[in-house]
Image (cartoon, rainbow, N blue to C red):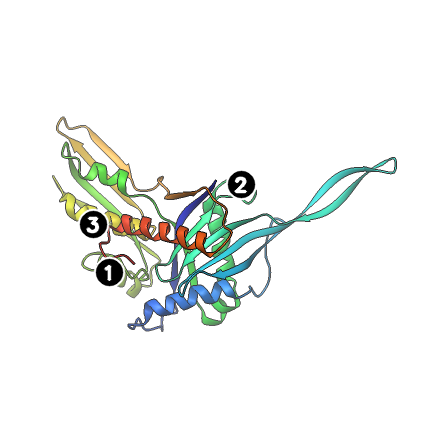
């Protein structure tokens, strides 16, 4: 069984890049351009070189590819009455599906590459940032895991608790679908101050759970963090975080053609829309 973990690919353009109406199209082009572009030099880490291969378009905005590493190993053999070491090359890989319109990325778990899929995502981030396309365009990529907001929202909406503190982190402007009223102004402030990451806190006797649910969904979809402090009727305090609940999509079949890839891509989009609770499907 394949287990795909969902990530968000954030694209940061140079400061002089104007955020015009075609920003989303430019983000899509940047992601596809970096994936299709080779790095200026091989990405080496601990004797291993990472590579992208088998690129296959799924539709106008989505791609499938394989991502893996080449490494040399030693095999102990016995030949002609003698023991000796033979060097051979292996190249384990995993499956990746990217929707450049949504900045959505699904990476299949592969323990031969890493025990954590998030580590594979970081290697992919390094690869994209080292691509000829990214270096020429002066674009930076950041890949962050998406966490399931439902467990935290369960606490936020639980009437036995009063929400007394809500803190969230935010990043430089990139995601096109964040909360317009509250988060985008904070992102613009961070950008104007030339910061990398920001954090804000709300405190009160009983914060509005409906507002906080919307904020939590928006923050979850962008790979940032939320921490909530709650208090029950007996005065017992509880602290809960958004992180630690990665979004996993399990798939039982082999990826042997576009039909399977389109089905898996649809599941990724549906899962994303459920996180954002979008009525109009992306």
Q: Give above or below for 233 relative to 246.
A: above
Pick out the residue farthest to the right: 81
Q: Residue at x 26, y 39 (%)?
A: 152
Q: Residue at x 53, y 53 (%)?
A: 67
Q: Residues within 10 Å of mark 1 (few under 14, many from 20)?
A: many
Question: Residue 232: percent from the left, percent from the top?
Answer: 16, 30
Q: Give above or below for 174 relative to 116.
A: below
Of residues 193 and 248, the one drawn nearer to the viewer in this rendering? 248
Question: Residue 141: percent from the left, percent from the top?
Answer: 43, 60
Q: CA distance from mark 1 to mark 2?
A: 38 Å
Q: Quadrant of residue 38?
A: bottom right
Quarter of the image containing the C terminus?
bottom left
Q: CA distance from mark 2 to mark 3?
A: 35 Å
Is residue 40 in view from this perspective?
yes
Q: Residue at x 39, y 44 (%)?
A: 249
Q: CA distance from mark 1 to mark 3?
A: 14 Å
Question: Residue 33: percent from the left, percent from the top?
Answer: 47, 67
Under circle 3, the secondary element is helix
Tag 1 near tag 3, CB within 8 Å: no
Q: Which mark is residue 111?
A: 2
Residue 168 located left or right of residue 232: right
Along the polypeptide, which appears first: circle 1 or circle 3? 1
Under circle 1, the secondary element is helix
Along the polypeptide, which appears first: circle 2 or circle 3? 2
Q: Residue at x 77, y 44 (%)?
A: 86
Mark 3 lies on residue: 214
Under circle 2, the secondary element is loop
Mark 1 lies on residue: 184
């Amino acid at each position: 069984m394949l287990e795909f973990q969902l990530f968000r690919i954030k694209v940061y353009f140079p400061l002089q890049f104007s955020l015009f109406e075609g920003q989303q199209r430019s983000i899509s082009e940047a992601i596809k351009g970096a994936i299709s572009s080779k790095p200026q030099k091989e990405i080496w880490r601990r004797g291993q070189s990472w590579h992208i291969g088998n690129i296959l378009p799924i539709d106008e905005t989505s791609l499938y590819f394989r991502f893996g590493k080449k490494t040399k190993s030693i095999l102990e053999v016995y030949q002609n009455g003698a023991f000796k070491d033979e060097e051979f090359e292996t190249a384990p890989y995993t499956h990746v599906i990217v929707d450049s319109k949504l900045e959505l990325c699904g990476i299949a778990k592969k323990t031969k590459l890493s025990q954590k899929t998030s580590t594979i995502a970081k290697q992919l981030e390094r690869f994209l940032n080292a691509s000829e396309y990214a270096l020429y365009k002066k674009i930076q990529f950041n890949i962050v895991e998406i966490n399931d907001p439902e467990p935290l929202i369960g606490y936020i909406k639980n009437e036995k608790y009063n929400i007394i503190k809500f803190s969230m982190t935010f990043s430089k402007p990139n995601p096109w679908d964040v909360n317009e009223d509250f988060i985008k102004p904070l992102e613009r402030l961070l950008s104007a101050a030339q910061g990398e990451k920001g954090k804000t806190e709300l405190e009160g006797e009983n914060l509005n759970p409906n507002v906080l649910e919307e904020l939590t969904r928006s923050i979850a979809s962008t790979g940032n963090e939320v921490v909530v402090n709650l208090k029950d009727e007996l005065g017992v305090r509880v602290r809960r975080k958004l992180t630690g609940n990665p979004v996993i999509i399990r798939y039982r079949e082999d990826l042997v053609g576009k039909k399977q890839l389109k089905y898996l891509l649809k599941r990724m989009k549906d899962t994303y829309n459920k996180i954002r609770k979008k009525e109009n499907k992306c």
